[in-house]
Amino acid sequence: KLIVEAVADLNSYSDGLLDWVLSKSNLIEDGVWPVRHLVRVFCNKTAATGSHVRALNLCRKLFGRVNALDVKVFRKQRTGLLNGLATMCNKIGADAPPIMLLFLDSKFSKTIEQRARVIRIAADLNMEFLGESLTDLARCLLAYMPLGAGLGGTRRSVLDDLMQHEVTQYKFELRSTSLIQTSSVFRLLQTVFKPAANDNN
């Protein structure tokens, strides 16, 4: 841990260092590697001079960190992670949505809180879902949660639980405003699916 902090404090960078960090399953996702170094050094260097493959891997690791962190730790690191993801998503373009969609799968996200967190980050990034990625998003949202994993232990779709999660989270705000005004998740879903619904009418 002390060595990691020392490397971060020195703003150290090399392609070899980044490749080594990316090769370790826990350094980024589990919050070991300091977020300040991830964003200020790894993300910015990769965006400026790095390969597309490194950018893809770094983006996936950052989404993994968003998904895996304890809620309190995530809140502290949210701004840094969002900045890093914005840099990586700009670098990889249309390859970003498929990476984000991985973390809606039950293999990575065991709870509705994790899924809501990932979608909220996607909304804050103004991520666009077109073509195949739109179809995949719909498939992820309409899939059923593992039996017993839904709110109340009932078998529900991810979308059902996601909407209930947002209503519960913003229940006090909803006394005076609408869900679309308070929930970035709901705004993203409306933005994504409204054109598709119009096309079917």
Image (cartoon, rainbow, N blue to C red):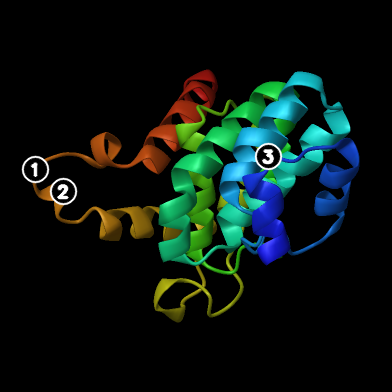
Chain-order first, disc 3 or disc 2: 3
Image quarter where the N terminus lies is bottom right
**Distance CA(mark 3)–CA(mark 1):** 47 Å
Where in the figure is residue 182, as x and y percent of width and height? Answer: 26, 40
Q: Residue at x 67, y 65 (%)?
A: 2
Q: Residue at x 42, y 54 (%)?
A: 76
Q: Are marks 1 and 2 in contact (CB under 8 Å)?
A: yes
Three-letter residue code for mark 3: Asn
Name the residue located 58 percent from the left edge and 25 percent from the top edge: 128
Q: Among all residues in the image, which is located at the extreme right? A: 16
For mark 1, give the secondary structure: loop
**196 on left or right of 163:** right
Cα–Cα span, label 3 and label 2: 42 Å
Image marks 3 and 1: residues in contact by CB distance under 8 Å = no
x, y percentage for residue 170?
24, 53
* Residues tagged 3 and 2 counted as in contact (Cβ below 8 A): no
| Badge nearest the viewer, 3 or 2 | 3
Estimate the spatial distance between the alpha carbons at disc 1 and disc 2, rounded to whole Å: 6 Å
> Local crowd at mark 2 within 10 Å, few (<14), some, or many (≥20)?
some
Instruction: Tell which residue pokes out farthest to the left in this image.
Output: 176
Q: Is residue 103 left or right of residue 132?
A: left
Q: Is residue 7 above or below residue 54?
A: below
Provide residue 171's location: percent of width, then percent of height. 19, 56
The amino acid type of the residue labelled 2 equals: Glu
Q: Which residue is mark 3?
A: 11
Badge 2 is on which residue?
173
In the picture of the structure, the residue carrying the numbered disc 1 is 176
Residue type at the position of mark 1: Ser
State which mark lies toward you, 3 or 1. 3
